Amino acid sequence: MARANARYYATHPLLSDFITAPEISQVFGELLGAWAATVWVSMGRPERVVLAEAGPGRGTLMADMLRLITARVPAFAQALEVHLVETSPLMQQAQAKALAPFVARVPNLSPTWHTTLDSLPGGPLILVANEFLDALPIRQFLHTDEGWQEHYVQNGAFCCVPCPAPSLPDGRTLDPDYVVELCEPALDIGRLLGQRFARTPGAALFLDYGHNSSRTGDSLQALRHARPAKPLEAAGEADLTAHVDFTAFAAAAQQAGAGIWGAVTQGTFLRALGLMERTEQLAAHASPQDAADLRSGAHRLAAPEKMGHLFRVMALTSPSLPMPPGFMKGPAE
């Protein structure tokens, strides 16, 4: 999965097999820009802060965030260092083009690119990641009458090999006769950020499709030409994804020192940030067709039968920071 997805993202700059939330509505990025500004204030308005995005796609999300930040919170814009975690040179070119208008007005917004999160500079950090964790490689384990088997790929076909029982950081009891998925890179990211936030002020926001329960099952899937495809068919030509196990991710980050908020549904999160109110503000000054598109986009992002329930949102923060916007105290949904 890792090699196939690396090839896919390096050779598909337009990401034509799917559409992400920032491409659906500019309001999505504006709300995340406001979220980041509020977190910056809760940090005590540090004079220098890293604003990073992992998996920035075409650069649409960061551009929408910066449009809001430069217009509404100029002091925050002046404090920013923009860093993008992106491995594809083609995507880096698209991101540079998307951010160029903001760099022309505020030179310190010129982005720096990284291939991994662990190379981000030190100091206060605000990280956003939309549909990033789902693209990381997973391991699959099956419980059979003969014991645990690891499900892996060899010579273009799925195979099984005996293995020890998998271990997840939340310590859940693994159901027999089910598939268990383990995303080790995501757990490593949770631990990395947890350790960092225990030492330095920071917050990270993850929006992805997945679950925050102890359930198990096979969620590996592929999209090719905007349609479901067999995961092993035309390797490198399809986008491979798996549902994010937010329960395991949260446990890894919390054990390393992070505060955990969520996961809540995307619909709940965006509505709490003012998705509908901002959409109506823009619609009031738009053409009838643009207003209809704005409202349709908001519905697609937040409606339970669309992306509103399937997608989940989780924040990791320094333990000393207050609850970030969009979340609630008490049990997650």
Image (tube, rainbow, N blue to C red):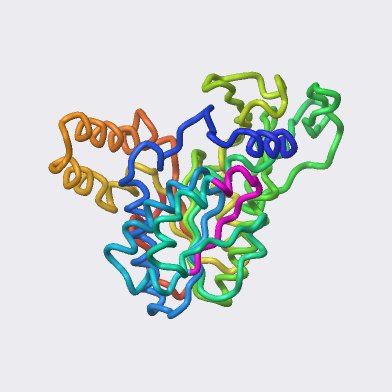
- Figure check: 156 above or below 101: above
Tell me which residue sits at (35%, 28%) in the image: 305
Numbered range of the magenta stretch: 81-93
Most foreground residue, 274 or 152: 274
Question: Percent x, y for residue 145?
Answer: 80, 25
In the image, is 206 to the left or to the right of 196?
left
Give residue 250's quadrant in the image: bottom right
Quadrant of the rendered image containing residue 2: top right
Q: How far from the left and from the top, in percent, is residue 148?
A: 80, 34
Image side of residue 138 versus residue 293, left or right: right
Residue at horizontal 85%, vertical 24%? 155
Give the number of callouts: 0
Q: Is residue 45 above or below residue 149?
A: below
Q: Quadrant of the N terminus?
A: top right
* 291 sits to left or right of 220: left
Residue 156 versus residue 211: which sits nearer the camera? 156
Foreground residue among 47 and 40: 47
Reply above or below: 249 against 106: above
Residue found at the very far front of the displayed protein: 104
Check if residue 246 falls in the magenta segment. no
Identity of the residue drawn at 58% across and 44% down: 91
Question: 285 and 231: which one is in front?
Answer: 285
Q: Position of residue 16 (x, y in %)?
A: 52, 29
Q: Is residue 292 above or below residue 269?
A: above
Residue 88 drawn in magenta:
yes
What residue is drawn where x is 28% and y is 38%?
A: 298
Q: Position of residue 331 (x, y in %)?
A: 40, 53
